[in-house]
Amino acid sequence: MVQKPETGTAVVRLARPDVGEEELAEIREVLESGQLTMGPKVAEFEALLADAAGTEHAVAVSSGTAALHVAVLALGIGPGDEVLVPAYTFPATANVVALAGATPVLVDVDPVTMNMDPADAARRVTPRTKAVLAVHLFGRPARIEELPELPVLEDAAGALGATHGGRACGSLGELGCFSFHPRKIVTTGEGGAVSTNDGALAERVRSLRHHGWSPSDGYVDMPQPAFNYRLADVLCALGIPQLRRLDELRAAYERVAAGYGQRLAGLDVVLPGVDPGDRHGLQAYVIQLKRRDEVMAGLRAQGIQCQIGTYALHRLGAYRSQGSFPGADAAYERALALPLHARLADGELDRVAEALDKLVSHH
Ligand SMILES: Cc1ncc(COP(=O)(O)O)c(C=O)c1O
């Protein structure tokens, strides 16, 4: 989306993948090898990812949505089952449950953390509830330990590099799901992965991404029909150098987040936070404020790209009629994602802060 500022100054971009010569060199290697998919880059990418996710296994797939879909199926979830899903999240989180033939049961979110509200989750458990799909929204680690005692599937789409209680997001539940869409800190253009410490689940995910062929017998038999959700070597190659410099990328994102923290401290906005000791994944820098739409329009008019946080599912046709979700409504109406990427300059931070200073009231 290209926006022209009124003032003629450069656009401040919401997101910008940090890719360049190293990625080109990796991709060139794949092109020259002649093997664009099912080659060695997949395994290399998966090993780096397993390391970052703190799990024994990582399985690369074609998107974060594909990761969630195969994770739900790997847990054996299907018709008649219910899965708890936050009412405020990217719709794919709930879509995959519905597409598996099960029922996504919406749970309200805490209006401050914007993650699932454990008390509301407990109220919505029934004998049919098979799992809880915990989202680390925008990279903020969810309080998994407060959720009902059910198998946990983590939507860690934006939580690569985040930690909760000293453990990496993606290693906290039965399975973790990552996205490598370009608004994520590591991107493959489109891509995703499933992380797990459970070898049997990893096998099932490998089978589900590859038509249902069975990994245990060398992909000879096909015990069940499944998908082609593979991630091509050429895309894994794009992700490899970024995973290698994940710490460096995280430091650059943290510099931006700290820069916002200092500049916006006096404004009447809620800044993103984490629980003590946790590390935020910084997929997005999402503030909460009154008159969000007006402020968003004001920023855009000055060439500052910004976006709503994410979606309140009960307001979408697919998920209406599950009741009221005041926490999700508040987040949906108040959340605003500000520009965040590794190369965001201090001058750009100043511009965003100065624009907000004029648009937002002070404490
Ligand atoms: C919380 C969450 N879940 C799932 C997804 C889906 O990931 P993908 O776009 O890679 O399919 C996203 C992506 O934006 C997301 O933010």
Image (cartoon, grey):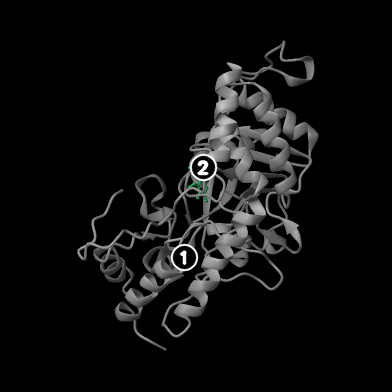
What separation in Å lies between label 2 and label 1 (alpha carbons)?
A: 27 Å
Extreme residue toward the bottom, this view: 363
- Where does label 1 land, which residue? 286
From the viewer's perspective, is residue 169 above or below residue 244?
below
From the viewer's perspective, is residue 347 above or below residue 170?
below
Measuring from the top left, give residue 86's x and y in whole percent. 53, 56
Q: Nearer the viewer, residue 257 or 279?
A: 257
Badge 1 crowding class, 10 Å Cα cut-off, few under 14, some 14 to 19, many 20 or more, is: many
Q: Amino acid at mark 2?
A: Gly
Measuring from the top left, give residue 17's x and y in whole percent. 48, 48
Q: Is residue 230 visible?
A: no
Measuring from the top left, give residue 152's x and y in whole percent. 68, 49
Q: Nearer the viewer, residue 217 or 40?
A: 40
- In this picture, residue 109 sits left or right of residue 144: left
Badge 2 crowding class, 10 Å Cα cut-off, few under 14, some 14 to 19, many 20 or more, is: few
- Taking the spot 42% from the left edge, 64% from the top edge, the residue there is 338
- Where does label 2 land, which residue? 20
Measuring from the top left, give residue 170's x and y in whole percent. 68, 49
From the viewer's perspective, is residue 359 above or below residue 314?
below
The answer to the question of whether label 2 and label 1 lie on touching residues, with beta carbons closer than 8 A, is no
Q: Nearer the viewer, residue 179 or 185?
A: 185
Q: Amino acid at mark 1?
A: Val
- Taking the spot 63% from the left edge, 61% from the top edge, the residue there is 142
From the viewer's perspective, is residue 101 above or below residue 134?
above
